[in-house]
Amino acid sequence: DTAVSQTPKYLVTQMGNDKSIKCEQNLGHDTMYWYKQDSKKFLKIMFSYNNKELIINETVPNRFSPKSPDKAHLNLHINSLELGDSAVYFCASSQGTGVYEQYFGPGTRLTVT
Amino acid sequence: GDSVTQMEGPVTLSEEAFLTINCTYTATGYPSLFWYVQYPGEGLQLLLKATKADDKGSNKGFEATYRKETTSFHLEKGSVQVSDSAVYFCALRHAGNMLTFGGGTRLMVKP
């Protein structure tokens, strides 16, 4: 009964490729997020979606494009991968954009070679 | 902008030792404050939270008190166990339910 799941868990790819990471939540939440955790463990918000609409887009290169086909899914597509994109990407969800707890997925470790 | 500063790790303790991980923040208004824990190979889990000044969050023997006057939210535990070994993140929440995290503090507890 995984609440927030991500696939794949590990992703190794070469520079210049395009890849996607998928996220699904079965909590019935309206809001989903993507976070990036770098090699020094710094964790930063990238995007936030509410009811399939983008509400937060931090200073992320436009090579990153989130897509939300429905409220339960928020996928992250990355074009023209660069070495600096290597990180662990976490998906999270919450009941709404108000004062609600965020539930995190297990993370996807992306390694760009 | 809002920011969170945590003490750098790693923090290495023997089992049953007392733990303090310092956290201070800079924010406009009165954000909610959180501690998250990340066990090896896993995602973040909410450990405890406090939503207003002088609130004390507690869970699994961990405690933290929201101190507005010192803009701090230090994490404490009276007696750590090996199973507490993890990375601990202090965070604040502001508009749009956005979380801003500190840099994380790795705790290693030795038997």
Image (tube, rainbow, N blue to C red):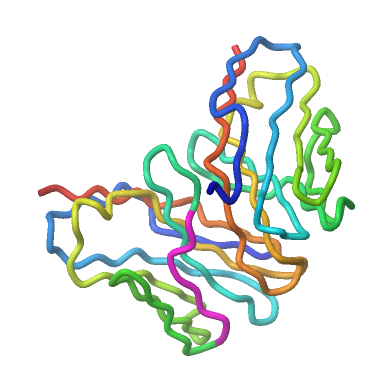
Q: Residue furthest right?
A: A53
Along the line of sight, the residue nearer the viewer: A55 or B92: A55
**Is B51 within the magenta?**
yes
> At 24% across and 48% down in the image, what residue appears?
B108
Q: Quadrant of residue B18?
A: bottom left
Report the predominant secondary structure element of the magenta stretch.
strand
Q: Residue furthest left?
A: B111
Q: Is residue A56 above or below residue A90?
A: below
Along the line of sight, the residue nearer the viewer: B28 or A63: A63
Q: Residue furthest front?
A: A1
Residue B24: image location, x then y, percent: 48, 69
> At 59% across and 67% down in the image, what residue appears?
B92
| Total count of labels | 0
Q: Quadrant of the N terminus of chain B?
A: bottom right
Q: Is residue A110 above or below residue A67?
A: above
Q: Write the start and end of the magenta stretch as one range.
A: B45-52
Along the line of sight, the residue nearer the viewer: A11 or B105: A11
**Is A106 within the magenta?**
no
Q: Quadrant of residue A23?
A: top right
> At 19% across and 57% down in the image, what residue appears?
B81
Residue A18: image location, x then y, percent: 77, 17
Residue A32: image location, x then y, percent: 73, 52
Q: Is residue B81 above or below residue B27?
A: above
Residue A39: image location, x then y, percent: 50, 33
Along the line of sight, the residue nearer the viewer: B30 or B56: B56
> At 39% across and 76% down in the image, what residue appears?
B64
Determine whether, in the image, residue A105 is placed left or right of residue A63: left
Determine whether, in the image, residue A23 is placed left or right of residue B55: right
